[in-house]
Image: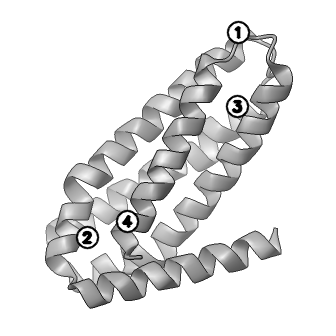
Amino acid sequence: MNAIELLKQDHERVKDMLNKLTETGERAVKTRTELLEKIEQEISLHTRIEEEVLYPALRQEGDKEEVKMTHEAKEEHRAVDDLVLPDLLKTDVGSLEFSGRAKVLKELMEHHIEEEESEMFPMCEKTFDAKRLEEMGQQMADLKKSLKKAS
C-alpha cells in the first residue's frame, strides 16, 4: 500500500471514531472512554508515522512550499497532541464540558485532514514516484506495527 492510501485510511478511521464520540451523550461514559482511548492511540500512531517518514521526505525532496506545509502540519499536530487531547483526557467523560472539547478536537482534526488530503497529498503524488510512495507506505506500516507492539 502506498503512503497516501495508508494515511487516508487512518484519516477515515479517526474521523469515524470522532463522529461516534461527538454523537454520544453524557450518559455514554463507557463508550466515550473506550472511543477516546482508541482515538488517542490512532492519533499518536498517525502523528509519528507522518513526522518520522512523510514530513522528512518532503523536507528533503520537496520545494519551499512543501517544506512550509510540513511545518504547519507539525504545528497542528502539536496543538492536538499537547493542548486539546490532554485537556480532553483530563475532562470528566460524563460532562457537558467533555462534549464541547470533543467537538473542538473533531473540528481541528477535520481541518488538518482536509488540508493534507487537498493540498499536501497531491503535492506528494507530484514529488514522489509510485515506487517511492510504496516504500514510504511500507516504512509507515512497519513503524506502526513496532509502535503497537511497544505499547
- Which callout, 1 or 2, points to the residue nearer the camera? 1
- Which callout, 2 or 4, points to the residue nearer the camera? 4
Local secondary structure at mark 3: helix
Would you identify the image quadrant in which residue 135 lies? bottom left
From mark 1 to mark 3, how far is it between C-alphas? 12 Å
Where in the figure is residue 6, as x and y percent of width and height? 44, 66
Residues at circles 1 and 3 in contact by the CB criterion of under 8 Å:
no
Q: Is residue 122 left or right of residue 100?
A: left
Residues at circles 4 and 1 in contact by the CB criterion of under 8 Å:
no
Identify the mark at residue 5; answer none if there is no mark: 4
Q: Amino acid at mark 2?
A: Val
Where in the figure is residue 55, as x and y percent of width and height? 38, 72
Circle nearer the N terminus (4, 1): 4
- Which callout, 4 or 3, points to the residue nearer the camera? 4
Q: Which residue in the protein does label 3 denote?
A: 88
Q: Which residue in the protein does label 1 denote?
A: 96
